[in-house]
Image (cartoon, rainbow, N blue to C red):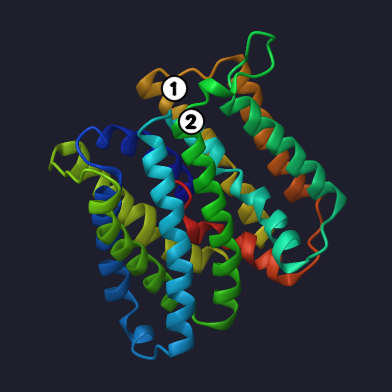
C-alpha cells in the first residue's frame, strides 16, 4: 500500500517535471537510474543469465517502454487523476487480451467488470456533446495516449507474469527496466524535441520515481507477495488512482467534474467487480495480474 501511495503521488510530480523536460528523456534518465540500482543489487542473479531469460526480459521491457512512453506523453496533455484512472483500466484489459489472443475462457463477472470499466473510460475521455451524450471532436489527445498506455501495460502484465514463472524475478526486473531505458533514449530524438533541465522538480522526480517508484518497489514486491495473494495485491493497486486524485486535488486543486467523476467511479467499480467476483480460469492469469506491480503503472 505504501508503494501504491508513492506511485499515485508521482503523477502530480511527473506532471510538474514535464514543464522542464520532454517525456521520453525524463523516462530515460529515471529508468537508467533504476536499472543501475537494480543491476547493482541483483548482480549475482544476472551473472547466471541465460539466452531465453534475456529474450523474455527484453520482450517484457518493450511493453514496459510502450506503457511509460504513452503514459508520460499523455500526462503532459491531460490531468494527473485522469491519467491514473485511465491507466488503471489495464487490469481489466488483461482478461480481454487473454481471450482475444490466447483463447482463455473468461468468467461472467469479469465481463461485467470490463463493461463497467469501459463505460467509465468513455465518460472520462469523451466530453458531452450537444445532445448530452458525446462530442468525439473534443476528445483530449492526452487521454487517447493514456488509453494506449493502459493497453501497453496490459500486455506487460501478461508477459511479465509468464516470464516470472520461468525465470528469476530479479533477472526480469533488471532486463525490463534496462530495455525500457535504452528504448526511451533511442526514440526520444525521433518522437519529440528532447530537452532536460536540472531543476529542483526534475531532480526530485528522477530520484523519487527512479529509486522508490521502480528500484525499491520491485524489491518490496518480491518480499511482500510471499505473504499476499495476487488477487489481494491487485485490489491494493486499485488505490493508486485514488491517491493520484487526492494529491492532484491537494496540490493542483484539480476537480474531476460530475461526468469524469462518474467515469472514475465506474472504472474503479469495474476493476473491483472483476477482481472480487471474477474467478480466475488459468494460473497464468492470476500470476499475471499479481505482476502488475512490476509494471509500476504509476511512477
The quadrant holding residue 13 is: top left
Asked which quadrant contains residue 198, the reply is top left
Mark 1 element type: helix
Q: Is residue 279 above or below residue 256?
A: below
Residue at the spot 27% in from the left edge and 36% down from the top edge: 18
Which residue lies at the image location 35% right of the left edge and 68% below the top edge?
179
Which residue in the structure is indicated by mark 1?
Answer: 249
- Residue plotted at (73% across, 50% down): 275
Return the residue at label 2.
Answer: 81
Upstream in the sequence, badge 1 or badge 2? 2
Q: Determine whether 102 is above or below 266 in the image.
A: below
Determine if residue 281 is in view.
Answer: yes
Marks 1 and 2 sit apart, C-alpha to C-alpha, by 9 Å
Residue at left 48%, top 36%? 83
Residue 228 visible in the snapshot: no
Answer whether labels 1 and 2 touch (C-beta < 8 Å).
Answer: yes
Residue 80 drawn at (x, y percent): 43, 32
Label 2: few (<14), some (14–19) or many (≥20) C-alpha neighbours in 10 Å? many
Exactly how many numbered labels are in the figure?
2
Measuring from the top left, give residue 252's x and y in whole percent: 36, 21
Question: Percent position (x, y) of residue 171?
Answer: 42, 78
Per the rendering, the mark at residue 264 is none
Question: Does 243 sit above or below residue 169?
Answer: above
Amino acid at each position: 500500500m505504501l508503494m501504491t501511495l508513492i506511485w499515485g503521488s508521482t503523477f502530480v510530480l511527473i506532471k510538474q517535471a514535464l514543464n522542464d523536460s520532454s517525456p521520453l528523456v525524463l523516462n530515460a534518465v529515471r529508468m537508467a537510474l533504476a536499472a543501475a540500482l537494480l543491476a547493482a543489487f541483483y548482480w549475482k542473479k544476472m551473472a547466471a543469465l541465460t539466452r531465453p531469460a534475456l529474450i523474455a526480459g527484453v520482450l517484457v521491457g518493450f511493453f514496459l517502454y510502450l506503457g511509460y512512453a504513452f503514459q508520460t506523453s499523455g500526462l503532459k496533455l491531460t490531468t494527473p487523476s485522469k491519467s491514473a484512472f485511465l491507466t488503471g483500466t489495464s487490469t481489466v484489459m488483461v482478461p480481454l487480451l487473454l481471450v482475444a489472443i490466447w483463447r482463455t475462457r473468461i468468467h461472467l463477472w469479469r465481463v461485467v467488470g470490463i463493461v463497467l470499466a469501459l463505460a467509465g473510460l468513455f465518460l472520462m475521455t469523451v466530453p458531452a456533446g450537444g445532445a448530452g451524450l458525446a462530442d468525439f471532436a473534443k476528445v483530449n489527445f492526452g487521454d487517447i495516449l493514456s488509453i494506449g498506455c493502459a493497453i501497453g501495460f496490459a500486455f506487460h502484465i501478461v508477459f511479465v507474469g509468464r516470464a516470472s514463472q520461468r525465470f528469476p524475478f530479479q533477472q526480469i526486473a533488471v532486463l525490463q527496466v534496462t530495455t525500457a531505458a535504452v528504448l526511451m533514449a533511442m526514440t526520444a530524438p525521433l518522437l519529440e524535441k528532447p530537452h532536460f533541465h536540472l531543476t529542483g522538480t526534475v531532480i526530485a522526480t528522477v530520484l523519487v520515481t527512479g529509486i522508490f517508484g521502480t528500484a525499491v518497489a520491485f524489491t518490496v514486491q518480491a518480499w511482500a507477495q510471499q505473504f499476499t495473494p495476487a488477487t489481494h495485491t491487485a485490489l491494493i493497486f486499485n488505490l493508486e488512482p485514488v491517491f493520484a486524485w487526492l494529491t492532484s486535488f491537494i496540490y493542483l486543486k484539480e476537480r474531476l467534474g460530475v461526468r469524469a467523476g462518474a467515469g472514475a467511479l465506474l472504472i474503479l467499480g469495474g476493476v473491483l467487480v472483476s477482481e472480487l467476483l471474477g474467478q480466475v480460469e488459468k494460473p497464468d492469469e492470476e500470476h499475471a495480474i499479481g505482476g502488475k506491480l512490476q509494471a509500476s503503472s504509476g511512477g
